[in-house]
Image: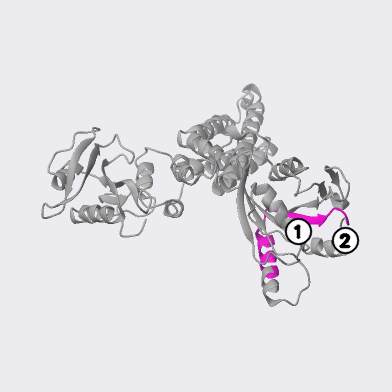
Amino acid sequence: MSPRSSSRDTIAAVATAPGRGGVGIVRVSGSGLPEFAERMTGRTPVPRQATFATFRDAAGQPIDQGILLYFPAPHSFTGEDVVELQGHGGPVVMQMLLARCVELGARLAEPGEFTRRAFLNDKLDLAQAEAVADLIEASTAQAARSALRSLSGEFSRRVHALTDGLAELRMLVEATLDFPDEEIDPLRDTDAVPRLERLRADLAALRGRAREGSLLRTGLTVVLAGLPNVGKSSLLNRLAGEERAIVTEIAGTTRDAVRETIQVEGIPLHVIDTAGLRETDDPVEKIGIERTWREIERADVVLQIVDARTGVTPADHAIDVRLPAGVARIVVENKCDLAQREPGRSEGERGRIHLALSAKSGAGMELLHDELLRVAGWQGHGEDAILARERHLEALALAAGHLDAAAAEMGRFEICAEELRLAQEALARITGEFCADDLLGMIFSRFCIGK
């Protein structure tokens, strides 16, 4: 939120997607909106009742006709008075309605400002607020279901259960500090150590679900790389289920990256076919090869495609040694049908996984799907996944580190108590109970206008 913005302002924005549509919605949030609506429509809105109305400009001339909805505070999305003007979804009509709202004293809402107000007014916690954007941006049905679970509060409830358990454990440890001369041992007599172990196990389970949810949210970037004519474009077409890339026997046909997003068990895989890697004097092909290496640098997984008839040649090995050290890689021995080989999985030098398959016939493609899921760390618990963001994963990892440190310091109560406090603080960042204002600004600025 900019320095000039105030949470007391009346704000307005077009809440529907840009472009033409059958219906368009202008949303207004603030205080005293019954009078606002009456000045625009000539009638007092009835709370939570759809009313047919004519929306008028300052001179009383009709702008549009549609549905007027009024949600009085605090029983609204933002916790403030909210008015929705549902008209015809033309861009000009929407802008005229929005301009009229500004004339009546509203200002244009900033990205995510409606959801930010819902958070500030305790209608949503921070994890739920982020789930609003995740639900809108979900690229698969599985991701949408996971986002809806977070929006309904499932993720937050699990985080709160952990923080409540930590609060109880801190009380026991700090009691030892407060009463050092007592004959009882609070840690022993109250099962403090088993409690800590249960908390660590619960946190580990939540981290696993969050990592899987992160995959559902962002997907996996998979780059197909290798020499010319080893079947990269054929493999992209097989993965996509249609002819997305040109396939010929002429080396260097692919000059630029071809991108396709597919789904495997609900996980978005962003597959990128690239120019064949070889020495060339063709200036256009050289540019394509430079772009290939840039795509490889950004990849989560590199599928190095080789010809099953020749195996890994010195030229293939030269590509392998140039691949970034931190990028997962799988060697795909394509054209196994022409090599008279059965599809299969094997382990090569330095533990490199080799998959023999045929992009042309589709034989062995299930092996590739399974291997990509394995590399991604997918455990197949998609229906229980938490659609986590990177900051959630970082907070969970930080909390786990502090719990590990607390377990190691059970004999030194001051240090143990401090590690438990830090773990609780890290978890509180997820729901926004402990959160800096600049972080809130960063989070909500990434929302779309009108949410």
Disc sitting over residue 313 in the figure: 2
Q: List x then y, in percent, for residue 24.
A: 31, 47
Q: Residue at left 88%, top 57%?
A: 310
| Relative height, residue 168 to residue 60 (above, below) | above
SS assignment at label 2: loop
Residue 129 is labelled as none
Q: Residues within 10 Å of mark 2 (few under 14, many from 20)?
A: few
Q: Which residue is more in the foreground, 331 or 411? A: 331
Point out the stretch of residues depicted in magenta: 289-310
Choose mark 2 or mark 1, whichever is in front.
Answer: 2
Q: Is residue 415 visible?
A: no
Give left or right: position of 379 versus 450: right
Residue 255 occupies quadrant: bottom right
Crowd tier of the residue under label 1, counting other residues whose Cα lies within 10 Å: few below 14, some 14–19, many 20 or above: few
x then y, percent, for residue 125: 43, 39
| Tag 1: amino acid | Ala
Q: As displayed, is residue 191 above or below residue 126?
A: above
Q: Position of residue 443 (x, y in %)?
A: 46, 51
- Closest to the observer, 103 or 75: 103
Magenta highlight on residue 120: no
Residue 337 at x, y percent in the picture = 84, 47
Cα distance in 3D space between marks 2 and 1: 20 Å
Query: In terms of secondary structure, where does tag 1 sit?
Result: loop
Marker count (numbered): 2
Kindly check if marks 2 and 1 are in contact, taking CB atoms under 8 A apart as contact. Answer: no
Which one is nearer the viewer's eye here, 302 or 285?
A: 285
Q: Amino acid at mark 2?
A: Thr
Residue on which the image places disc 1: 325
